[in-house]
Image: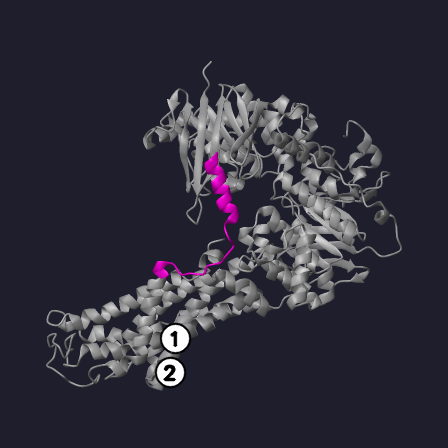
Amino acid sequence: MAPLVKVEGLRVTARDERGRNSVIVKDVSFEVQPGEVVALIGESGSGKTTIALSLMGYARSGARIAGGSITFDGRNVLGMRQRELSSLRGRDIAYVPQSAAASFNPARPLLKQVIESSQLHRVMSQAEAEAKAVSLFHELVLPNPERVGERFPHQVSGGQLQRLLAAMALVTDPKLVIFDEPTTALDVTTQIEVLRVFKKAIKERVTTAVYVSHDLAVVAQLADRIIVLRDGAIREVDTTARILTEPKNEYTKSLLAAAEPLERTATINALQATSAPPVLEVKSVLAGYGAVDREGIPALPVLRDVSLTIKSGTTLGVIGESGCGKSTLARVIAGLLPAARGEIMLNGVKLPLSAAERTRDQLRRVQIVFQTADTALNPARPIGRILGRPLEFYHGISGDKQRRRVAELLDMVRLPAIMADRYPNELSGGQKQRVNLARALAAEPSLMLCDEVTSALDTVVVAAILDLLAELQRELGVAYLFISHDLSTVKAVCDEVMILYAGQMMEHGSRSALRQRPLHPYSNLLISSVPELRQGWLDGINETVLKEASAGVARPARGETCSFFERCSVRIPGCCDVEPTPFRQLSKGARIRCQRTEEELMQPTVR
Amino acid sequence: MSVDQTITAVEAQAPPRHRVRLPLAGMIGAAIVAFWVVVAIIGPYIAPHDVGALVDDGFGPLRWGQPLGSDYLGRDVLSRILVGARYSIGVAAAATFLAILMGGTLGMLAAVSRGLVDMMLSRFFDGLISIPSKMSALIVVAALGSSIPVLIVTIAVIFTPGAFRIWRALAVNVNALDFVEVARARGEGTGYLIREEILPNIAGPVLTDFGLRFVFAVLLLSSLSFLGLGVQPPNADWGSLVRENMNGLAEAAAAVIVPALAIAILTIGVNLLIDNLPGRGSSAGEH
């Protein structure tokens, strides 16, 4: 059978701001057979999206397809005129982009947008297209498929929007669908349902698809074949099973290794109970945004009754989905968002809630490190000055002494001393994150608040940063509050883990306790939603897990009741949604917030 | 493959050296601005005639003694342009600078302080902006009499709310970025935040704003002069030269066109220079 897509010697060049040309895709050749799902996998900058876009004869601005040939369905794509390309795109080749929220026009109802391509290409009448769209909504398990098309993009959740994008792509029955990281922006519990309906849709209609992703575990569930890319060149092409079990290329091996980070040994001696007060103690903090009422409670409470302790030299992981209040927690502890209620104790001493009222020494002891290194460094100042400022501010170090200390700090985060003269935009993402860490270290803090410090980085770089964090902790005895949405990262570095859902603490226990049952129902959902690096994981998931996952969005409950009520598989109507949820101490050593007793949670039916 | 390697090699050795030279357009702009600044300083000394002296009939032709002809009263146009440079450039530049100093500083202060301070400053300037600018200028000049310092301050006050708005809007964007949060968490004061974190990162767009506002100031000055409230006769700025000779466009075109050209060339020069100032790309284009 003739391949549907045949790419030969594809070469794409890009011109940067200074007018220099560089080759971003180098002599790439591959084929896609009809009915096959091929994954393009690689880190950022590997050229995976560029290749996927060039299949439609498209190059992003600044980039140019410089050579090679692309044959789609027997036609030469690169030789086509603009009009021919337009008739190809959206009709024969459909594209599902990463960010669903940015891909919909917020001012038009969804159904109109979903059938737009069918109307543009005059494939079918409007009524037919609408019927087709509704049947697709059924197939993609959208809630209320008959009516969902009347809604506007902001009225549906992120996972639903992503499925609507897929419906938009499938409405013209394209011969090829390109998925460009369609689940990367989603939470794990949402990702799982989207992946499942995608897989079902692809398999049922025997769609040919190109799936672009950086996540091997996700790709393993969908793809027949995997193409591993690095620096714009193909490193390895093989069936999914062979790539996962017997990779030949060194780079593929390192990707596989990085996908499952090594668990670092817990800092055992530090964990043992000492008489010294914990470095940080947060007691029933309430915080949020918006106008405050007469009792000082903000209109939009984000954190409700959150307590935690961090012992000196240990790491507490905070995990939860987007919007659960993890970053707000870091901002509250740093004093950037003063809590409305509650107490924050540092080394047993009560801290003022607002950073403006804290002493310089108190400020020095708690340092915050932000997620996006791109915006966390002042682009108009050289690295040396960025690192020098905390030295001068907290320790009064200036001049030659400061320069020496900056070099030491750079060395501490494994960067060469000449970096001091560079500006942030000359550094790579991983390097910026190291500078970010070095700036926090310059203050010699006893606690660092790491807010998703690894989320924007590639897997291989993440592993290096995690190693660095662990090493710094061993050497300097600094404690971390490590915030992440990624369970495997948290499991890799943290001694203790706290699970946050819609501003409420759901489970708080040691890392090993996360592996023992019973778990809080939400912890259970979260843990079973993380894709595993083996084929067939998606098909083997417990049905109850999926039922919970698809139940909808996190909505903070009123008062002291459980926020997870709506999605919980073991909820007790009339109890969970009415009465304040108690904390329970489990025999495995963790604390959970649940109405169910330990025995009830252990029962298989409940689980 | 060899091509790729050369490219990587070139990238690797790309020096981190920072913006030493102005691009050509910037050099041209700088040359124009420098030329006019020199004219503004030495203008009165190199002018062939006195600005008030009647050397010819009204709208006289171009001749050796008066290379640009004479104006509606018969005064030498070249001399009037040379002397007028001082008023047009001097008053407009000083007023714009003052406006940006006041509006810009308060704008950044409002953005960094947020809350009540921001609210009060913003509403105050909203109120100020609602007063028609020429009317308020008229009242001020009528009350205090027309002199160069009064003109400068009046024009500056008129332009301050606009500058405040732009600076505040730009600063609010930068203020929301993480590195400002980091500095705030470190305990830095408002002055440091404005000086080190905000200002360098809004310099680019803010300089463009300066260029635009400067041109408006030249125009406002000329309209004030037209009303008789600006630069007092026999001196004149370029804007009023254009206006007072408007009727003679058919007979003595140079008397109208040359001052207008002077305004245009100065404007283009200022904007060429500002758009190509070093450091703009690195700080402004990023976000």
Q: Which residues are magenta?
A: B1-26
Question: Does residue A79 appear anywhere in the picture?
Answer: yes
Could you tell me which secondary element the residue under label 2 belongs to?
helix
Q: Amino acid at mark 1?
A: Ala
* Image coordinates for residue B265, horizontal then vertical, percent: 28, 66
* Mark seen at residue B95: 1
Question: Does residue A124 appear anywhere in the picture?
Answer: no
* Image coordinates for residue A484, horizontal then vertical, percent: 67, 44
* Image coordinates for residue A99, horizontal then vertical, percent: 52, 39
Q: Chain of mark 1?
A: B
Near-viewer residue (A77 or B135): A77
Near-viewer residue (A78 or B103): A78
> What residue is shown at x 78% (from left), y 44% (from top)?
A496
Near-viewer residue (B14 or A259): B14
Crowd class of label 2 (few under 14; some 14 to 19; many from 20; radius 10 Å): few
Is residue B6 inside the magenta stretch? yes
Relative to A475, B231 lies left or right: left
